[in-house]
Amino acid sequence: MKSIYDFDAIQMNGQPLALASLRGQVMLIVNTASACGFTPQFGGLEKIHQAYKDQGLAVLGFPCNQFGSQDPGSNESIASFCQLNYGVSFPMMEKIKVNGPEAHPLYQWLCAEAPGLLGSKAIKWNFTKFLIGRDGRVLKRYAPMDKPENIRKDIEVALSAA
């Protein structure tokens, strides 16, 4: 059986990130978009990152252009947009697909581990969030309309777990 630690991602700067390097941390994994009604959530994600990074939270953004073509730019333009408009300092990965046969293996695993409403395995829209516990297990899946500030309590509980 696979775990979160079996996956790698490529950061915006082209450097690989082995999720095994985050073992023991709480992770918040989010598929993002730069031109979506939920895009202002970047601000909330950055606030959570700043508030909890020293306690062991890793926020990881995965841009995706599969929903309404709302992130058509290059990795460089996406990174610039996130930094300039929202001060994003948490790791942003290269643009990926989150649904379908070309979905990133991490997202295939996340969707299998934490199905959405009515057991759906697909990601429905940008800014779907997955909270991963210190043990590498998916604790919860959040819908795009769940604002980052509204999941702080779940993050604090996850961070307090041994």
Image (spheres, grey):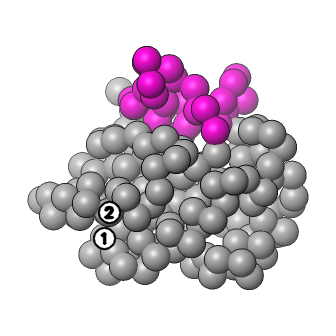
- Can residue 64 be seen? yes
119 part of magenta stretch: yes
> Would you name the residue on which mark 1 appears?
56
Which residue is at 77% across, 72% downward? Answer: 81
Mark 1 closeness class: few <14, some 14–19, many ≥20 residues within 10 Å: some
Give the residue at x 47% y 57%: 147
For the residues carrying marks 1 and 2, which lies nearer the camera in this image?
2
The Cα–Cα distance between marks 1 and 2, rounded to whole angstroms, is 14 Å
List the residue tagged with mark 2. 152
Q: Is residue 79 above or below residue 54?
A: above
Q: Quadrant of residue 155?
A: bottom left
Q: Earlier in the sequence, mark 1 or mark 2?
A: 1
Which residue is rendered at x = 14% and y = 58% of the image? 161
**Left or right: where 88 falls relative to 74:** left
The quarter of the image holding the N terminus is: top left
Where are the magenta residues, as a range?
Answer: 98-125
The residue at 50%/69% (across/down) is: 44
Q: Secondary structure at mark 2?
A: helix
Does dot 1 land on a helix, a strand or a loop?
loop
Left/right of residue 137 with respect to residue 129 in the rendered view:
left
Whether residue 21 is visible: no
Q: Nearer the viewer, residue 24 or 54?
A: 54
